[in-house]
């Protein structure tokens, strides 16, 4: 069946996040990254919306969340769990929510019981003891139903600080007509990818194999994961590993700089009109896409609808199966809630039940699951999209979801993302190279982390 969705708004939200990072410098202190030993208290905020389907006398929970379709899942939970009444509030998307959440935690009032937190931001709240350890409430019993990469990002040692929901595994999304017309075969290694890009460009200098936006933090870091060059290590506590200048990291930077310098790839802003125009005109023959990407992309192009096919990401080593993760969210129970048990039951159901995923993966939410039973479901894998014709992208993305490299996000990602935009802007402009930007960024981030009281390792 064709999987139609309004989740194209997800791509627009992610694009807005990228632009808003330039405005976040004054808000960084509001995120819980500066106080290594802070404790938090909080409670349910007054509800701004009415929750339907609640039983009389039910325990009230406030849930902050912005993704599409979450309201439908909340309504289903309330109908099937009459003793708990979840009230969904939109406190803003991504960083806008995190700033409000951090402020409420520090103030000791106004925090929700449950909050949506993307994987990369969880350590910033974990380090300040702002989240409830869900392992105390049996939530870890669903571990076997979650993709390993998702589970690793919500846990520290034996503690579980959130419930995984969705993921953004990467795959090669390519225009089959452009590949055929230009005699290209689908590349299986990054070496093959560079060769195909050179072949395409030689046929028409106006064409580039794909787009690489140097200023877009999350997707570059996702590509670095897949390349086995992720630059951070962090397992909790006050020590962070930051290494953008190691052998693998510099190999990654030199690889992409080579493609940029030879104009074998474009450097348009992700989600910009120029990016969509390039994909729709054939100026880009492929997109290195997260699983949520094709749905939004089909709302932004028209000429190449039906031409796009999904393949495994190119690998550093022939025969590999690695993928990176771009995006994905979890639900965390906020420390200080008076109803931790009920909140834990809710998040466990939300991310770890078939009933919830019937809604979350449906036509309104369109989330890509970290939930393994759905990843393995033949009906889910057989879904098609208008943009992919009769091919089935979920078959590839589901496989990628179970072969992702574990990223260890440090508790300084708000500052890291803010700094990234300005440091890497020169790569887009052509006034610096990607290896130069990596070297500069390494020094900037190490200095910042040390100023916040962290011990930093660099190898």
Image: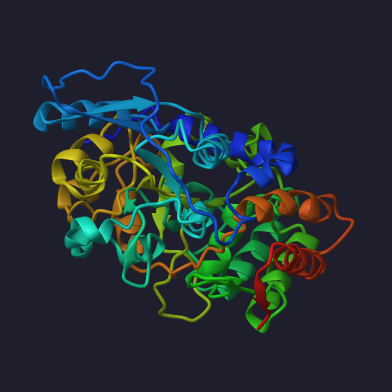
Please determine whether, in this image, residue 250 is positioned above or below residue 325: below
Count of numbered circles on the image? 0
Residue 235 pos. (x, y %)? 48, 73
Residue 113: horizontal and vertical position, in percent?
34, 38
As drawn, 337 above or below 173 = above
The foreground one among 364 and 118 is: 118
Quadrant of the rendering where the N terminus is positioned: top left
Picture layout, residue 128 above or below residue 342: below
Where residue 279 sits, quadrant-wise, is top right
Relative to 261, is 221 on the left or the right?
left
| Residue at figure coordinates x 55%, y 61% from the top left | 37
Quadrant hosting residue 389: top left
In the visual, does 174 lie left or right of 429? left
Q: Residue at x 64, y 62 (%)?
A: 197
Residue 387 in picture, x, y percent from top left: 41, 37
- Which residue lies at the image location 65% right of the left edge and 58% below the top edge? 200
């Amino acid at each position: 069946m064709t999987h139609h969705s309004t989740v194209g708004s997800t791509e627009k939200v992610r694009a807005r996040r990228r632009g808003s990072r330039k405005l976040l410098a004054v808000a960084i202190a509001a995120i819980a990254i500066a106080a290594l030993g802070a404790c938090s208290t909080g409670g349910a905020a007054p509800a701004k919306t009415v929750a339907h389907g609640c039983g009389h006398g039910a325990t009230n929970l406030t849930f902050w969340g912005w993704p599409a379709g979450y309201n439908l899942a909340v309504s289903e939970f309330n109908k099937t769990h009459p003793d708990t009444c979840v009230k969904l509030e939109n406190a803003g998307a991504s960083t806008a929510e995190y700033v409000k959440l951090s402020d409420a935690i520090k103030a000791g009032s106004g925090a929700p019981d449950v909050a949506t937190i993307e994987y990369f931001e969880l350590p910033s709240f974990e380090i300040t003891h702002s989240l409830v350890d869900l392992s105390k409430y049996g939530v870890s019993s669903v571990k076997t139903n979650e993709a390993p990469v998702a589970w690793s990002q919500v846990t520290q040692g034996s503690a579980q600080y959130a419930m995984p929901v969705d993921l953004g595994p990467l795959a090669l999304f390519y225009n089959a007509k452009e590949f055929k017309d230009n005699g290209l075969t689908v590349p299986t290694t990054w070496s093959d990818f560079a060769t195909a890009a050179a072949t395409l460009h030689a046929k028409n200098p106006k064409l580039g194999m794909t787009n690489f936006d140097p200023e877009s933090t999350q997707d570059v870091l996702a590509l670095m994961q897949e390349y086995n060059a992720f630059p951070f290590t962090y397992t909790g506590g006050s020590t962070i590993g930051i290494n953008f200048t190691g052998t693998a990291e510099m190999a990654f930077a030199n690889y992409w700089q080579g493609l940029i310098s030879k104009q074998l790839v474009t450097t348009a802003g992700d989600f910009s009109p120029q990016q969509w125009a390039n994909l729709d005109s054939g100026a880009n023959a492929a997109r290195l896409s997260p699983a949520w990407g094709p749905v939004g992309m089909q709302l932004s192009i028209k000429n190449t609808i039906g031409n796009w096919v999904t393949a495994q990401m190119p690998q550093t080593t022939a025969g590999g199966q690695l993928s990176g993760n771009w995006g994905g969210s979890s639900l965390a129970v906020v420390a200080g809630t008076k109803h931790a048990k009920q909140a834990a039951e809710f998040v466990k159901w939300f991310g770890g039940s078939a009933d919830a995923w019937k809604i979350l993966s449906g036509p309104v939410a369109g989330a890509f699951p970290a939930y393994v039973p759905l990843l393995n479901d033949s009906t889910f894998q057989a879904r098609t999209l208008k943009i992919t014709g009769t091919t089935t992208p979920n078959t590839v993305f589901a496989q990628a979801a179970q072969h992702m490299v574990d990223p260890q996000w440090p508790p300084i990602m708000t500052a890291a993302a803010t700094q990234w935009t300005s440091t890497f802007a020169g790569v887009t402009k052509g006034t610096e190279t990607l290896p130069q930007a990596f070297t500069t960024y390494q020094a900037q981030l190490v200095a910042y982390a040390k100023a916040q009281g962290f011990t930093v390792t660099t190898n």
